[in-house]
Image (cartoon, helix red, strand yellow):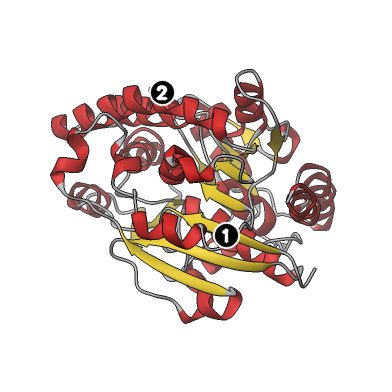
Amino acid sequence: MSDNHIHIVSFDVPYPANYGGVIDVFFKLKALSERGVKVHLHTFEYGREHSPVLEKLCFSVNYYKRDTSFKKSLQRLPYIVTSRLSDELIGNLKKDDYPVLLEGLHCCGVLLDESMAGRKVFVRAHNVEHDYYRLLAKSERNLYKKLYYSMEAVKLRRFEKILDNASAVFAISNNDFEYFRSRYENVHLIPAFNGFSDVNVVEGQGDYVLYHGRLDVAENYDAAEFLITKVFSRLDVRLKIAGMNPPERLVALAAENQNVELIPNPDDSTMQQLIRNAQVNVLVTAQPTGLKLKLLNALFNGRHCLVNSKMIDGLNIDDLCVVADSADEFVEAISILMTMPFNSEDVEKRRNGMDAFYNASDAVGEIIGLL
């Protein structure tokens, strides 16, 4: 494997691996590197620092400033694409003929360049992006952001046809695989990478429920608000909410409820301890798109997992989770799960289920084979 090289173009600096998309990018490049592939990382930066960890893992690392100026949002192409167009990046990719892996439609401006014709260029589809942005618009309360998400969804639907120029598309979930396979050639299901390969659940019984996510995303804020106002207002059970950048309105809402604790911007170690020590990890989404990496984390490391049906749509893991959708169903499920210790039989069932559902070693092997 020592002669295998790959360029990976990332939409954001993938370390620290502390939110959805970059988790998949980081642990994928880490897995490739550990298998002997020489990774040439190209990453856009807009607020996250350069990382010695990446420079140690990768054969080379190049950083590019993302142009987040307002004028980029006025163009025909999606803003997430135009803000990442880079002649410097194209120039660096043209220095050799190694395969290229583009992370998301965000980085697919590369496929617009004629010099990439005939080159092995693969695309990791993290979502059906236009569906993702359409649902973001539906959840968003800020009128300016709602308009932006709606316009971006239209642009992304139109731009998605650029995938015809890719050598292959790597879908992240069963539903996304079926969507892309019906529209494009050479589509492969490559599950998300998240750094966990073994179930590591603490047996016993915790005394709180955990909800975690990136809290400045409207969908996650709405989920947290639903849990506080519709579910835990009716329960004598502690709820801990942990995540990045909680808005002030969520901070105030949590403070109004004695059984709710908000933990802003926890580091990786703290977050993992919260997941492992919770009696129930509750996961709610309005978007049946992609594969939620926080779900994988909870299944590998947490006790009982309580989810709504959209969280596991198309994943065939109903037997590993308890499913609830209405507030009444969540109240009932939490009341029951808080009384049920997670024992050795539960751990073994989780281990067997995860072995059947998710195998990162097979996934990285398939990528190497395609390269």
- Give the residue drawn at x 64%, y 18%: 182
Amino acid under disc 2: Arg
Q: Does dot 2 land on a helix, a strand or a loop? A: helix
Q: Position of residue 8 (x, y in %)?
A: 55, 58
Q: In which image quadrant can residue 181 be found?
A: top right
Q: Is residue 264 above or below residue 345?
A: below
Residue 25: quarter of image: bottom right
| Residue labelled with disc 2 | 157
Is residue 37 visible from the viewing direction of this image?
yes
Residue type highlighted by circle 1: His
Q: Position of residue 281 (x, y in %)?
A: 55, 49
The quarter of the picture where the N terminus appears is bottom right
- In the image, residue 143 above or below residue 121: above
Q: CA distance from mark 1 to mark 2?
A: 26 Å
Q: Is residue 354 above or below residue 180?
A: below
202 vs 141: above or below:
below
Q: Which residue is mark 1?
A: 7
Q: In front here: 185 or 310? A: 185
Residue 50 percent coordinates (x, y): 39, 75
Q: Is residue 308 visible?
A: no
